[in-house]
Image: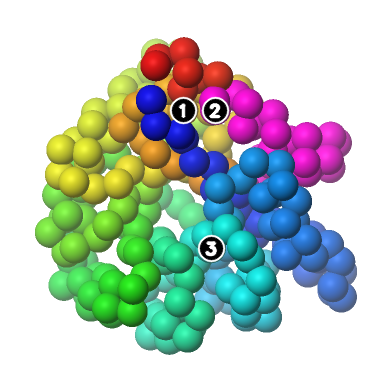
Amino acid sequence: MKHLRLGVNIDHVATIRNARGGVHPDPLRAARIAEAAGADGITAHLREDRRHISDADITRLARELTIPLNFEMAATEEMLSIALAHKPHASCLVPEKREERTTEGGLDVAGSHNTLRYYVDSLKGAGIRVSLFIEADPRQLEAAKAIGADIVELHTGAYCDAEAAAARGQELERIRKAAAFAEELGLECHAGHGLTFGTVGPVAAIPTIVELNIGHFLIGEAIFAGLDPAIRKMRNLMDDARQAVA
């Protein structure tokens, strides 16, 4: 069974820093702790309104990280120019609205493929792997393949938010089928959004998912337990779930 990669999103270290201003806590320091605790990569979302991660953070992360940087970005000319300047390992295109608290839902790749293809082509032309954050929907997967994406990241929010066991099971099955279909299409499949210690196991057990991206929960848990122990526990839960289906 393939190693399941863990990408740690450090956005909300910057959220805490920005609540007061100054330089503490430092997202780059968090990224280094994450690497030491078992993270395989770091995710950072430079939003158009700069509500958490800053341009300076991206510059430092791109320059100093020794593990891959996944640069989350809206499909805009401004963000494209920043990605091309820094050339991260990967760029994940995500939907973005100023009024939302966090990313809500996936990209409508099928409905905006002509626009998105330009960004996919531009990023890939610079040697950057391209990921699209989408719902677990066959139509969106087919569209992602058609415009040349390397990776899809399945939105796990509905699964994590479901309170009833039956509803959660339905969402999990939707993710499982989408991950299998992604593999059939030749797309690398990632997943993330809202995953916790309590919800990560069933998703980690899906063999066609190769990476989970987790952030907000880990930063919140770090307040109580520390960032290193929180990431190590998540890493162990992922490994245990994957080994159980090996």
Q: Secondary structure at mark 2?
A: helix
**Magenta span contains residue 31:** no
> Taking 243 as reference, is 63 left or right?
right
Q: Nearer the viewer, residue 201 or 36?
A: 36
Q: What amino acid is found at the position of numbered circle 1 in the picture?
A: Ala
The answer to whether 192 is drawn above or below residue 122 in the figure is above
Q: Nearer the viewer, residue 209 or 154?
A: 209
In x, y percent, where is residue 239?
Answer: 54, 25
Q: Is residue 101 visible?
A: no
Going by the numbered disc 2, the residue's amino acid type is Met
Mark 1 to mark 2: distance in Å? 5 Å
Distance CA(mark 3)–CA(mark 2): 20 Å
Residue 110 at x, y percent in the picture: 17, 57
Position of residue 25 in the picture relative to residue 57 (left or right): right
Q: Look at the numbered disc 3 and give the secondary structure of its residue.
A: strand
Residue at the disc numbered 2: 238
Q: Residue at x 73, y 63 (%)?
A: 27
State the count of labels: 3
Q: Residues within 10 Å of mark 1 (few under 14, many from 20)?
A: many
Using the rendered image of the protein, determine whether residue 223 is visible from the camera's viewpoint: yes
Q: Compare marks 3 and 1 and give the one earlier in the sequence.
A: 3
**Which range of residues does the magenta coloring cover?**
215-239
Q: Could you tell whether 118 is left or right of 242 in the image?
A: left
At 49% from the left edge and 66% from the top edge, which residue is drawn? 71
Local crowd at mark 3 within 10 Å, few (<14), some, or many (≥20)? many
The x, y position of residue 217, in whole percent, is: 66, 40
Name the spot of residue 219 as percent of width and height, x first.
72, 46
Residue at mark 1: 204
Main secondary structure found in the magenta portion: helix
